[in-house]
Image: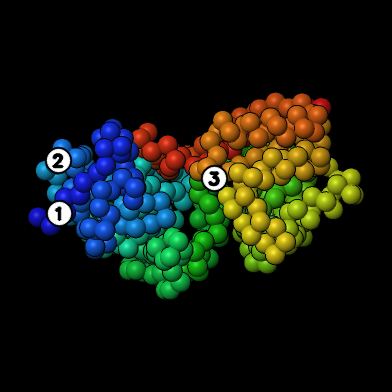
Amino acid sequence: MQKETNVKILKKYAAQLQKGYPLILKDALANPGLLKNEGEILNLLDEQGRFLGKGYYGKQNKGYGWIISKKENEGIDQQFFTRKLKAAADERKPFYESADTASFRMFNGEGDGIGGLTIDYYDGFYLISWYSLGIYTFKKQIIQALKETVSFKGIYQKKRFDFKGQYIEEDDFVEGERGEFPLIVKENGANFAVYLNDGAMVGVFLDQREVRKTIRDRYSKGKTVLNMFSYTGAFAVFAALGGAVKTTSVDVANRSKSKTIEQFSVNGIDFEAQDIIVEDVFHYFKYAAKKKMKFDLVILDPPSFAKTKKHTFSAVKDYKELLKESIEITEKNGVIVASTNSSALSMDKFKKFIDAAFKEIGCKYKLEEEFSLPGDFKTSPDFKEGSYLKVVFVRVIS
Ligand code: SAH
């Protein structure tokens, strides 16, 4: 049995943890200085010494670790990790069996019972993300658990536990066979070029799968599409596949241009018939308004927080302005797809921003549909912040 450290939880936080909240906040600890070794197993006790849960110590930007068991006599051993991964893989059976999707999240942190750990599947390759040194200390057991659960071509990893949760740049290959990149993976019949060993980001955000499909299948035919904060252009690719007459992708990062050309190309789309623009979206809004350009579909997918040379964008502070600029260049009866992954914005608050933006412009709108995380990004009902994605399709009426 692994050594366990008893830690006292302050009264104010005990009830919440008792009910199932899995994150161990620094403020909840009576004596945070007691924690010494990342990966240490913690027995959390209330002030009366009653058992609240078992967790591990792993400092990340969110907190000091995660509760991973509510059973006092459950060992955090090899069987524990194997059980968790097997249960997660079982729940993704429809994804493993899908003929037209080969990219999904196989293990989603606290939603699957172990906060600070995610595992993504890309056509036979697994990508493990470690969000603290603490969880990384279980690497051997977790890889063994993966081996006992699935067969794979190769395993890659992202260490995201440098200061402030930053990615640590290194060779991300772990074991098995090395992939040849770009790896072409399917998503609902479309292709994505992904790179598992080329920095923090692989080329696609899997959590937007359903939004991409909806855009392709129901919102693109015959439409002009503006894709703001486009990264590798995934939304534009799906719009083009859905019959958009033209897509325009805008991202400030230089790398976005060649990456977007590549995503169009691996889907057999002539990228020269599309606009791919490297520019600050706030410039582009001004330019488009001046030229009186209008689009049928405008997609907004900004980061929660971003700094460019001229602008600091924060979703909480600036989303309403972003919407107002978008409304001005959207055709009547056109649609704005507004997305945010900011955990500081609840769906309610987000919709209030949308309402305020339309009111300030003096324009009517209709909420067409909304999305949160897809099923493979399993979330915990006890950890609402884990459900970070909010996407709303809004029709501009008049
Ligand atoms: N919509 C993308 C993901 C967006 S990630 C997808 O579907 O894959 C956020 C992107 O916003 C990054 O590529 C970043 O370069 C870009 N970005 C951040 N601030 C920006 C700005 N002011 N103007 C344009 N792009 C910006």
Q: Which residue is mark 1?
A: 4
Q: In front: 297, or 222? A: 297
Label 2: element kind: loop
| Residue 92 percent location from the top left of the image | 37, 42
Residue 388 in view here: yes
Q: Does ligand 1 reach within 8 Å of label 3's beta carbon?
A: no
User: Image point 24% across, 62% down: which residue?
Assistant: 36
When the figure is inspected, residue 112 is found, relative to residue 118, above or below; the finding is above
Q: Which residue is mark 3?
A: 342
Nearest-to-viewer mark from 3 and 2: 2
Marks 1 and 2 close (CB-CB < 8 Å): no
- Spatial separation of the CA atoms under disc 3 and disc 2: 37 Å
Q: Check the image and report above or below for 348 versus 39.
A: above
In which quarter of the view is residue 40 placed? bottom left
290 to the left or right of 297: right
Q: Earlier in the sequence, mark 1 or mark 2?
A: 1
- Looking at the image, tell me whether mark 1 or mark 3 is earlier in sequence order: 1
Q: How is the image coloured?
A: rainbow
Residue that sits furthest to the right in the current view? 291
